[in-house]
Every structure is written in structure tokens, then in C-alpha cells.
Image: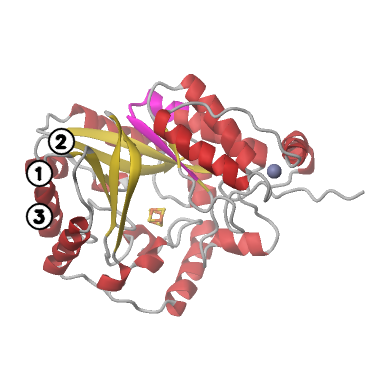
Amino acid sequence: MEIQNLMREIRADALDKMEKRSPQDLAASWSGEDLLYSGKGNAIFIVLPTPGCAWALSGSGGCTMCSYVADSPLDEVDPDLLVDIFKKSLEKHAITEKTVVKIFASGSFLNPDEIPLSSRNEILNLLKDEKYVEEVVVESRPEFVTKNVLQECCDALGDKIFEIGIGLETSNDYTREKKINKGFSRKDFENTVETIKNTELKCDVRAKAYIFVKPILTSEKDAITEAVESAQYAESVGASRISFCPATIHKDTLMEQLWKGGSYQPPWIWSIMEIIKQVRGSLEIPVIMDTAGFGSRRGPYNCKKCNSQLKSMIIQSNLDQSIPEDLECECKNKWKTEIEFCDITRSTTNLVHKK
Ligand code: SF4
Ligand SMILES: [Zn+2]
């Protein structure tokens, strides 16, 4: 496949340039207010160093917008060291109110080649007796979610919500295959959600769908429509929560190359507001909008006057699931023009307005 040939080359170059860092250097953690299934609470985020996303390191080259593999030591991490890193990260944060622990593996937590089985079970087991921890959230590609794996995870974790975030990205198979190079289909996602819903388990396993806003070669208007349709689809096939990831430009990706060449621009924050309005008005399940990179050169952007205010409004609306109120700014007309004319101009970047 052409996209995979291209991605293989880009990934090989990126890996060549990468500076090796130790697992300890790559680990990170932070905490903050978040929305749990039971309401507002605390979230602890823990990034674990792993040998890197198997899909990105395979002959496929991985996804066109993602450089998470750069956050990996690219070597096997000793299973005991991994557990130790997790323990130390967790200890940095007081757990005194209801809490969700979100574990990021820069790939698939459920792939034993990325997180060794013994580490996975020990990490989950450490959370079992934390009485304020209500939810544990991990990420995985669908191929690693099997009945067996779910049973093992629940045995280790006990009676808590175990949420698996799956990078569906879009409900459109063409976009996922040709523009994102994701390597799995809508059907694969549906089968995985079925497995999650239909396996009898000790813990409460739920599926979260990650949806990517504005893949490459997508106009501003289509990005809005596709994001909204994808969320509606994910809910209809059984996802329990949606998390939107608006594009930010990662280093050494195909998306970065197109952006540098003037053929790609991350979405407007106005488009993000439009998506929130439409999904919060039509979906029953919680919908979270990630605001990482908002207002930066490589992220979703309106203008200097309104970026920060809109970002704060979106963060607040994530916590109470409200629809943010309308805001006016002079840049809004440029966004409206782009939405109106992008079908005619076939443009996937911001139009330049000349007098
Ligand atoms: S988006 Fe996920 S599956 Fe794709 S390359 Fe990045 S970590 Fe791997
Ligand atoms: Zn503005």
C-alpha cells in the first residue's frame, strides 16, 4: 500500500534521528480535576516507558499523525523496573478522593510485547486495594483485547471500572485506512466492543472511543462532519465514552511534512466548538474534548484574542458536560468563510484572505 511505503520511510528516518533515553527519563506523571463516570473527581495520569507501539515499529510505519514512539526507550524494559516506575509515579500523588488512574503506554497496554504480562497484572493489582480508585483507564489496539486478557486484567484489578480506550479515530474506513494508516477496520472495533460487553467479568469493563479531529487531506468542513458522525457511530455500537483528539502536529510524521509544505493545517478552535455543540446535543454518553496544544503553533488555533478563553471554556465544559456558550471574535468570520468555501476551493488549509 502506498501510504505504508511512505510511512515506513518516514518512520525509519525518525527512528534514525531519535536520541536514546532511559526508561526513568521517559516516565512521567501528573494529576488534575477530571470527570469520572460518577461525577467530578481527581485523575492521576501515568506515562510508562515501553519498547514502543508495535504498530508504529512494524512494516506498516504506523499512523500518519503519531510520534508517540519517540517517547519510548525502544528497548525492552525490565518488568520489575516497569512496576517500580509505576509505584513511584503513583506514590507522588495523594489519593484522598474519588480517583481515576489513567495509564499511558504510548501504544497498547494490553500487548504483552509492550507491557509484559507480569508487570501488567502487578500494576493492576497495586490499584485493587486503593479504595478511592474507582476507574482505571488504559489504551489498546483492538487485536490485543481478548476474553482471556480481560479476565486476567479483572482478576488482578478486582471490582472497579476498567476502561479500554481504542483509537477508532473515525467511523470512515477509507479515512482510517488511507489517511491515517491505522491498520484496523470498523468491524474490528465493533467486534472488540462486543467482546468487552459480552464477556462475563469480575470488573466493569467499558470501551472508550478516541476520535481524531481533522486527519490529513480533510477539509475543515468535512473534519467537523466526520467527527460528529464518528461519535454517533461509536455510541451506537456500544462505546461508553468518547474522547476527541483534535490534531496537533507531532514531529517527524507525514502530517508534519504536509504542514511544513503548506498542505495541512490543524483545525480551528471554532470547529472544535461546533463539534462539541453537535455531539453534546445528540449523544447520551460522556464526551471529552482534549485541549492539548490549543493555541500553539502546532495545535488547534483561532487567534491570540480568543484562544485562551475558548480553551478554558472547553475544559470547564468537559467537567460538567455542558455546551459552552457562544463567543464572538473577529476571527470567526474567517472560519465561517473557510467552512463555506472549502468545498469549492478543495482546500485543507486556512484560506489566505487578500484585499
Ligand atoms: S496512534 Fe496509536 S496505534 Fe497509531 S502509531 Fe500512535 S500509538 Fe501506535
Ligand atoms: Zn479570535
Q: Nearer the viewer, mark 3 or mark 1?
A: 1
Badge 2 element: loop
Residue for point 27% across, 64% down: 50
Residue for point 16% across, 41% down: 150
Where does label 3 land, which residue? 122
- Whether residue 104 is visible: no
Residue for point 19% across, 46% down: 95
Structural crowding at the residue carrying mark 3, measured as other residues with C-alpha within 10 Å and reported as few (<14), some (14–19) or many (≥20): some
* Mark 1 C-beta to ligand 1 under 8 Å: no
Amino acid beneath label 2: Lys
Q: Is residue 177 magenta?
A: no
Where does label 2 land, which residue? 160
Number of marks drawn: 3
Report the magenta residues as a range: 232-245
Query: In the drawing, does residue 309 fall left or right of residue 192?
Result: right
Answer whether labels 2 and 1 touch (C-beta < 8 Å).
yes
Query: In the drawing, does residue 83 fall left or right of residue 69?
Result: left
Residue 195 figure quarter: top left
Structural crowding at the residue carrying mark 2, measured as other residues with C-alpha within 10 Å and reported as few (<14), some (14–19) or many (≥20): some
Amino acid beneath label 3: Glu
Where is residue 236 drawn, in percent x and y?
39, 23
Q: CA distance from mark 2 to mark 1?
A: 8 Å
Mark 3 or 2 closer to N-term?
3
Badge 1 element: helix
Residue for point 52% across, 29% down: 229
Ligand 2 shown in quarter: top right
